Amino acid sequence: MKKSLQDQLLKSGLVDEKKLKKVARDKRKQGKQQGKGPAPVDEITLAAQQALAEQVAGDRRRNRELEEQKQQKAVAAQIVQMIRAHRIVRGGGNTPYQFADHGKIKKLFVSELMQNQLARGHIAIVRLAQEYECVPATIAAKIAQRDADAVLVLQQRDTQQIDGDDPYADYPIPDDLMW
């Protein structure tokens, strides 16, 4: 009951103050009991909570994808920076060096010294966009850690001892063998 209605009922004599206080007290008790009891399950609230949970999960997935893309771009930028900073100028070499790039045979003209270094594993050939560059083997190893497909030619240095029982020990493979 509103105060004005209560006042009107009091003035008219239909209600006394004890009854008004009792009604107010009962109303307060009823309000407190409703607050303590289990909350009624509302389908709309459940649907809203489920939609919010799905949205949060979707946002997390998109954020992970964006983070992975950022990392891939950062790695690609590091590779480009390493190649540009450490590339070896081929100069006016006229010796062809052939290598495979995704199943296709490519040819790169290098000097004889660079050809020997390529064969011995001192330098390597890496891909920079649509071009090929020569870099030191240590840099090529760092590039291979980030993206193995970027390194096209990196010969393993021969650290094995020649077996004494090997019948072909007297016939070593030449470093300048071309195929």
Image (spheres, helix red, strand yellow):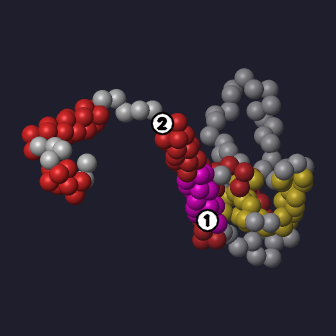
Q: Could you say where residue 109 lies in the image, as x and y percent from the top left? A: 84, 67
Residue drawn at (62%, 40%), measured in percent from left and top? 159
> Is residue 165 inside the magenta stretch?
no
Residue drawn at (64%, 66%), measured in percent from left and top? 80
Residue drawn at (68%, 33%), measured in percent from left and top? 162
- What residue is pinned by disc 1? 77
In the image, farthest residue toward the bottom: 92
In the image, farthest residue toward the left: 18
In the image, farthest residue toward the top: 165
Magenta span: 61-80
Q: Could you say where residue 9 lies in the image, as x and y percent from the top left? A: 20, 50
Q: Residues within 10 Å of mark 2 (few under 14, many from 20)?
A: few
Q: Secondary structure at mark 1?
A: helix
What secondary structure is the magenta-colored segment mainly? helix
Front residue of 35/56: it is 35
Q: Is residue 13 above or below residue 135?
A: above
User: Which three-letter amino acid code belongs to the residue tagged 2?
Assistant: Asp
Q: Is residue 164 left or right of residue 109?
A: left
